[in-house]
Image (spheres, helix red, strand yellow):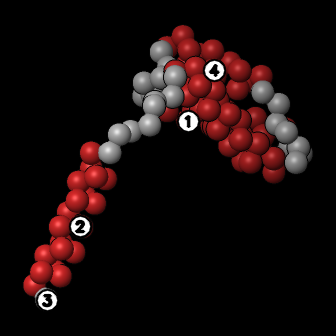
Amino acid sequence: MELFFSGILIIILLGMLYLLFKPKGTPKSKPIKQAEILDGYKDKMDKELLVYLGDDKLFLQKKMALLKSFATELNRNIFFDVDETKALIQKLVLYEIKKV
């Protein structure tokens, strides 16, 4: 019986070591990651601003709040420098919400 439990323990330890040291997938390139982040922000804007389409003043306030939060996130993101952050925010400013 001890041999059985020792075998199971060894298998579990080997599994843990494999998970710890398994090769990672190839990292995404900077342009691909930037495009994914931009698409994510557009999706978030679509979802959160859709309910405010009838009220221009409230829509503008909510859009500005979202853009400020996006800019704050991008300032801490390693995939964007200052100029890239400004360019992405400018794209988001001009982005029109998709009506679903």
Foreground pick, 78 / 55: 78
Above-or-below relation of 94 to 16 = above
Disc 3 from disc 1: Cα separation? 59 Å
Give yes or no for contact between labels 2 and 1 (Cβ–Cβ under 8 Å).
no
Q: Nearer the viewer, mark 2 or mark 1?
A: 2
Q: Earlier in the sequence, mark 3 or mark 1?
A: 3
Which numbered disc, 3 or 1, marks the residue closer to the eye?
Answer: 3
Using the image, tell me which numbered label, if any, was put on residue 69.
1
Q: In which quarter of the view is residue 12 placed?
A: bottom left
Separation of marks 3 and 4 at Cα, in angstroms? 63 Å
- Amino acid carrying mark 2 in the image: Ile
Kind of element beneath mark 1:
helix
Q: Earlier in the sequence, mark 3 or mark 2?
A: 3
In the picture of the structure, the residue carrying the numbered disc 3 is 1
Residue 15 relative to residue 73: left or right: left
Residue neighbourhood size for the residue with mark 4, other residues' Cα within 10 Å, grouped as few (<14), some (14–19), many (≥20) = some
- Work out how far the residue at label 4 is from the one at label 1, CA to CA, in angstroms: 13 Å
Mark 3 vs 2: CB contact within 8 A: no
The residue pinned by badge 4 equals 88
Q: Real-space Cα distance between discs 2 and 1?
A: 47 Å
Horizontal arrangement in the rendering, residue 94 relative to residue 15 (left or right): right
Q: Quadrant of residue 67?
A: top right
Residue 61 in view of the camera: no
Q: Amino acid at mark 1?
A: Ser
